[in-house]
Amino acid sequence: MSLRETLKGTGVAIITPFDTNSAVDFDALGRMIDKVIGEGIDYIVTLGTTGEAPTLSKEEKINIIEYTYEKTANRVPVVVGIGGNNTQELIRDLEKFPLGQSVAVLSASPYYNKPSQEGIFQHYQTLAKASPKPIILYNVPLRTGRNMTAATTIRLGNEVPNIAGIKEASGDMAQCMHILRDRPADFLVVSGDDALALPQLACGLDGVISVAANHFVRPFTDMVRHCLDGDFAAAKEINDQLIEAYEIMFCENNPAGIKAFLAESGIIGNNLRLPLTPLSESVQQKVRLFQSAFFKKNLHKANA
């Protein structure tokens, strides 16, 4: 089976829970993994930005990867995030991190040093040669400071054998459509933007790597499946209920928003590592109000 088929649907960019002493809370991570798998997620992406990877040590990252394999027990595929702006350091990570049980590596485009398109191409070409697993590109210019153009994406897909797809989070619908038109046959294209997922899926994307799916697992995965089945009326009905949640989730920082929702449900503690902080009280109140209204409405529908 191609990676495009393996990772079709909804992946969750899973959070990293911390305890009150800022240590990784593996018990809470285990609850999260059981929750998202039990409620229908298609695959897990660990060590992404939503997992606060920039604040984790290499030892912590290795421990999280190994624990995730152990806890998933082959129930769903696992993708490991290994990205950054130091190409040589990333090669060392690709050599040292336990990637044997993963299906792919998700690698964010270099941030801060703002390379040219040729620099982005050569960075990924170098990583692909060193990686024991297929590389999924990750274009998120609001975080990296540099957009990876559709032309660069297609060039990588055509010229570099170990480049298998892209998580496209530029927010540029025209760019997505260019990639979809020109991609190689087995090239995976998934959304990295929950709020735009529905229209992007309508254009032909293969799925989503979602933040919202940490908490709103079943409704979000149902929405994606409806889209992939061509039932956009059913998908829109679900998505309309989640629009406000997307806005709350990302209004201050990610993952503070999704952690606030999860903490309200008692699944994790509401703890982040600096420089990130929990939501302000005014936004936390919006989380409480939305959560109460959303689940009351859906409980009523389930009992009707």
Image (tube, rainbow, N blue to C red):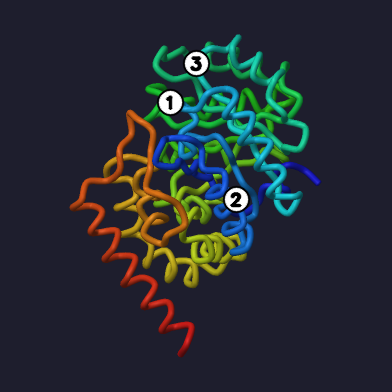
Q: Residue furthest bottom?
A: 304
- Residue at the image point whose x is 72% and y is 16% from the top: 130
Q: Residue furthest front?
A: 21
Neighbourhood count class around disc 1 (C-alpha, 10 Å): few under 14, some 14–19, many 20 upward: many
Position of 248 compared to 93: left or right? left
The secondary structure type at the circle numbered 2 is: helix
- Residue at the image point whose x is 52% and y is 37% from the top: 178
Residue beneath disc 1: 147
Residues at discs 3 and 2 in contact (Cβ within 8 Å): no
Relative depth, front residue between 149 and 298: 298
Distance between the alpha carbons at the discs numbered 1 and 3: 14 Å
The secondary structure type at the circle numbered 1 is: loop
Residue beneath disc 2: 30
For marks 2 and 1, the one nearer the N-term is 2
Q: Is residue 100 above or below residue 43?
A: above
- Residue at the image point whose x is 50% and y is 27% from the top: 56
- Residue at the image point whose x is 49% and y is 53% from the top: 214
Residue beneath disc 3: 85
Between marks 2 and 1 in the image, the one whose residue lies nearer the viewer: 2
Relative depth, front residue between 157 and 238: 238
